[in-house]
Image (cartoon, grey):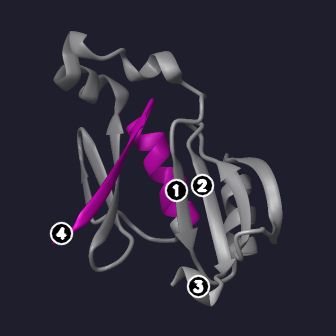
């Protein structure tokens, strides 16, 4: 694989863009009607696509994404420095606290929030050597 992009379906592209700009403290690498992208590393991007946009592509074959609004449908598991700061920023800019930053039985120290569309975001601060 040359590059990986995860795309979240969002109710309001502009509102979600502002949330992620503030959360990640970065500007999008692409911001056009129908798609906003954030380059998270050299080979990983996070995309934000309006629910109505993907609904046009998937048509009648799948339910409209807005039918699952607010229901956790994915998790972004992000290994960062200063996870507590990310968690606090996420809550400050409209995310919801799910669980505090704490040591988990799989060896990571992780805290959880949800974004404004209900997607779960986990911020991992310390990683055990077995998971690298």
- Magenta-tinted stretch: 1-23
Please tell me whether mark 3 sits on a helix, a strand or a loop. Answer: helix
Question: In the image, is 105 to the left or to the right of 34?
Answer: right
Q: Which mark sits nearer the N-terminus, 3 or 4?
A: 4
Res 130 label: 3
Q: Nearer the viewer, mark 3 or mark 4?
A: 3
Please tell me whether mark 1 sits on a helix, a strand or a loop. Answer: strand
Do the residues under discs 3 and 4 have CB atoms within 8 angstroms?
no
| Residue topped by disc 4 | 1
How far, Cα to Cα, is label 3 from label 4? Answer: 23 Å
Question: In the image, is 66 to the left or to the right of 58?
Answer: right
Res 121 label: 2
**Residue 110 in picture, x, y percent from top left:** 72, 68
Local crowd at mark 1 within 10 Å, few (<14), some, or many (≥20)? some
Q: Which mark sits nearer the N-terminus, 2 or 4?
A: 4
Do the residues under discs 2 and 1 have CB atoms within 8 angstroms?
yes
**Residue 38 in picture, x, y percent from top left:** 35, 63
How far, Cα to Cα, is label 3 from label 2? Answer: 22 Å
Residue 28 forms part of the magenta stretch: no
């Amino acid at each position: 694989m040359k590059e990986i992009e995860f795309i979240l379906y969002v109710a309001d592209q502009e509102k979600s863009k502002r949330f992620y700009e503030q959360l990640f403290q970065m500007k999008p690498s692409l911001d056009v009607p129908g798609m906003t992208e954030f380059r998270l590393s050299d080979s990983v991007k996070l995309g934000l696509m309006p629910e109505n946009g993907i609904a046009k592509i998937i048509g009648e074959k799948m339910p409209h994404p807005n039918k699952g609004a607010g229901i956790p449908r994915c998790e972004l598991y992000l290994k960062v420095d200063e996870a507590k700061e990310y968690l606090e920023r996420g809550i400050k800019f409209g995310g919801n606290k799910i669980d505090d930053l704490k040591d988990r039985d799989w060896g990571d120290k992780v805290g959880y929030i949800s974004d404004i569309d209900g997607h779960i975001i986990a911020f991992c601060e310390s990683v055990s050597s077995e998971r690298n």
